[in-house]
Amino acid sequence: MKAYETVIGLEVHVELATKSKIFCGCTTQFGGDPNTHCCPVCTGMPGTLPVLNKKVVEFAMAAGLAMNCKITQHCKFDRKNYFYPDLPKAYQISQLYLPICRDGGIEIETEAGKKTIRIHEIHMEEDAGKLIHDPWEDCTLVDYNRCGVPLIEIVSEPDMRSAEEVIAYLDKLRLILQYLGVSDCKMQEGSLRADINLSVRELGAREFGTRTEMKNMNSFKAIARAIEGERKRQIELLEEGKKVIQETRRWDDNKDTSFAMRSKEDAQDYRYFPEPDLPPIEISDEWLEEIRKRQPELRDEKMLRYEKEFDIPAYDAAIITGSKHLADLFEETVALCQKPKEVSNWLMVETMRLLKEQEMEPEEITFTPGQLAALIKMVDGNKINRTVAKEVFEKIFKENVDPEEYVEKNGLGMVSDDGLLRSTIEKIIADSPQSVADYKSGKTKAMGFIVGQTMKEMKGKADPGKVNQLVKEMLDSL
């Protein structure tokens, strides 16, 4: 069998986090009863006119700058004509000839090393509605709530060669967009969707093979499986002496296979022409500079700063900055308690453990920086020990309790009465002659039994360090 190389380019559709749609005032809020977030403009009723949402242009510029693109300061919209049931006006307002961003690129890192993936363009457009297939009634219904939700489409060059590179690229895009605040990138809600353009060619060949497109992939796992499945399908066709047909395919993740949907359209099939209802966009130098100055610190810069400023390991910095919500939580908690390593430890150990147990994403965390800072201050001030702190943290994580109130209400504060501690240890020593004898004969581990019994008697509310110190003193004095 010949050796083949996979060639992959992506078209990534990103729903922008504006409060209203791209050309009307309807809400972009996810959900809602079908057909309640729409109006005559976004459903394309005759006689209506679009009005461009300025925030969409600013978000597109911010994304372009973060992805090292050139900003097209004189750009315009075009009309893309096609009929589909979820596009009631039978055309989509998009950008073909003068997209707002061009010629960019981002760096990814995989086990093979670092690599730059070039970005051909980023353009603005409106989203279509959504078809809902009802298997019970054997019919298809249409929800127009999503019509007119603003999108940017990020079109890469065919620079990726494996599923690993594709996932690294998508993850980098997701983090950039989240840090910019231009999208929540919730794939399960359709905020980030990818079309995969894939072909194979013999290793060493210069010409690209015939590509197919798999549309609207919305999970990293499905994308990785779809790439491997389509790669294998095309290689099998070529090995059998058959041709790969240029077409749009649908990936069925349950059946682990793809199905042909329609022949792949080219630009001329859409009969593009300049959008007559919208004037060109003029981006001044001043406006562009204003957006440039607003650009936040992105993940790569933040990660390096955490290592240097907070002296936390590179691994911890990478995990924490891998979620904007987690990074914000870290920084805001550090600002309140001035204990970066402690905050990092709580996030890296207990938070990650509970996220895994509860099958949650970091973005679903509900406890506040104030709650975590208060817990850390109680441990630091010897008001509670670390064992109790873990119990309290779990309550904070799951039930959003106030840590100080919870400790007081449940009597979990540290026992600082030396007299009570000494009398408890004396009683346990008196009841443990064998452990005392073992300790006196040089078996120092025997002391651990007495320490453990003391902590049990004190219901975990004693300072373990203090208990160890007193037990040793009292055993040595016998």
Image: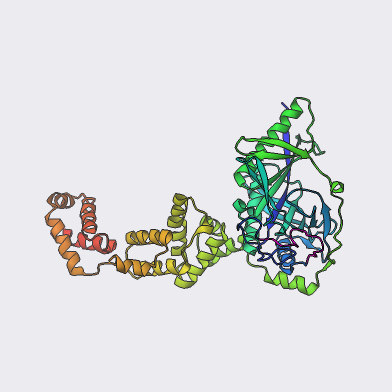
Residue at 87 percent across and 47 percent down: it is 268
Is residue 47 part of the magenta span, yes or no? yes
The image quadrant of residue 453 is bottom left
Q: Nearer the viewer, residue 110 or 273?
A: 273
Locate residue 451, reporting x and y percent: 23, 56
Locate residue 102, reporting x and y percent: 79, 58
Q: Nearer the viewer, residue 148 or 106?
A: 148
Is residue 206 part of the magenta span, yes or no? no
Q: What is the quadrant of the N terminus in the image?
A: top right
Q: Identify the residue at the far front of this view.
A: 137
Q: What is the quadrant of the C terminus in the image?
A: bottom left
Q: Is residue 419 visible?
A: yes
Locate residue 465, reporting x and y percent: 28, 62
Q: Nearer the viewer, residue 96 or 259?
A: 259
Residue at 54 percent across and 65 percent down: it is 328
Q: Identify the residue at the far bottom of this view.
A: 286
Q: Is residue 3 visible?
A: no
Provide the major secondary structure of the magenta segment: loop
Report the side of 430 relative to 70 (left or right).
left
Locate residue 151, reporting x and y percent: 72, 58
Q: Which residues are magenta?
A: 37-50
The image quadrant of residue 146 is bottom right
Above or below, 201 relative to 471: above
Q: How many marks?
A: 0
Q: Nearer the viewer, residue 213 or 442?
A: 213
